[in-house]
Image (cartoon, rainbow, N blue to C red):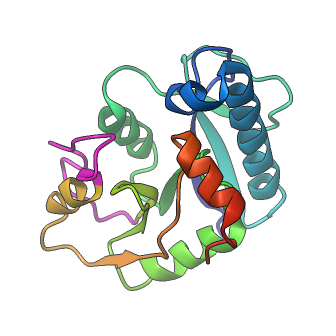
Amino acid sequence: MRRETVLIFARAPRLGTVKRRLAAGIGARAALSFHRATLFSLARRLGADRRLRPIAVITPDRACIPGLGLPTIGQGRGDLGARMARALARFPRRRVYVVGCDIPGIGAADIMAARQALGRADAVFGPAYDGGYWLVGLGPRRPARLFAGVRWSTADALADTLANFSGRRIAFLPRRRDVDTVEDLWAIQTQPPER
């Protein structure tokens, strides 16, 4: 069985450069600790599953993340859409999934659910409560301009992306909360796990 390629998009864990909106509420050191813990936890969970081939897609491009235990590639320049499109283009003829590291609890079961959804769809999305998405999975049949015109970090990010997939079969995973602010962090700490 071919392993599923999972691209984990992340910033290198450096003080003052990660989770800035979260840092505004809990401080830069606590935000760095959160980012590092979720990144390393996700890398361990996905790396432990033989069905998966996780790759860290990092910025800055030449950053080294000691102990992560995953192969890494650089994100390159441009907005998030340009960086994701470039990473996805490295795998044009296979299923590939992009996840961020700010959704605590993502695991192999989520990727396998996305894989199953791609059996009947051209793309699968994991919507986030803030209007974005925590996962995008694609098969080989993709639009030419995957992320054109997407208003990133807004409540319109998923809707804008879906407009680029007009005429394609789309599947959705359950909605999840990503952690961008202190309110998001409180919400995941006080609510039962989402499934």
- Pinpoint residue 143: horizontal percent, then vertical percent: 21, 57
Question: Is 57 drawn above or below residue 183 in the view shown?
Answer: above
At 47% from the left and 27% from the top, the residue drawn is: 75
Residue projecting furthest to the bottom: 120
- Pick whichever, 80 or 189, lies toward us: 189
At 42% from the left and 62% from the top, the residue drawn is: 129
At 68% from the left and 16% from the top, the residue drawn is: 14
Whether residue 30 can be seen here: yes
Asked if residue 144 lies in the magenta stretch, the reply is yes
Question: Is 136 drawn above or below residue 148 in the view shown?
Answer: below
At 70% from the left and 67% from the top, the residue drawn is: 108
- Pinpoint residue 94: horizontal percent, then vertical percent: 47, 61
Question: Is 86 drawn above or below residue 65 in the view shown?
Answer: below
- Pinpoint residue 47: horizontal percent, then vertical percent: 79, 52
Residue 56's quadrant in the figure?
top right
Left or right of 89, for residue 4: right
- Pick whichever, 131 or 27, lies toward us: 27
- Pick whichever, 3 or 101, lies toward us: 101
Question: What secondary structure characterizes most of the magenta part?
Answer: loop
Q: Which residues are magenta?
A: 139-157
Whether residue 58 can be seen here: no
- Pinpoint residue 11: horizontal percent, then vertical percent: 58, 27
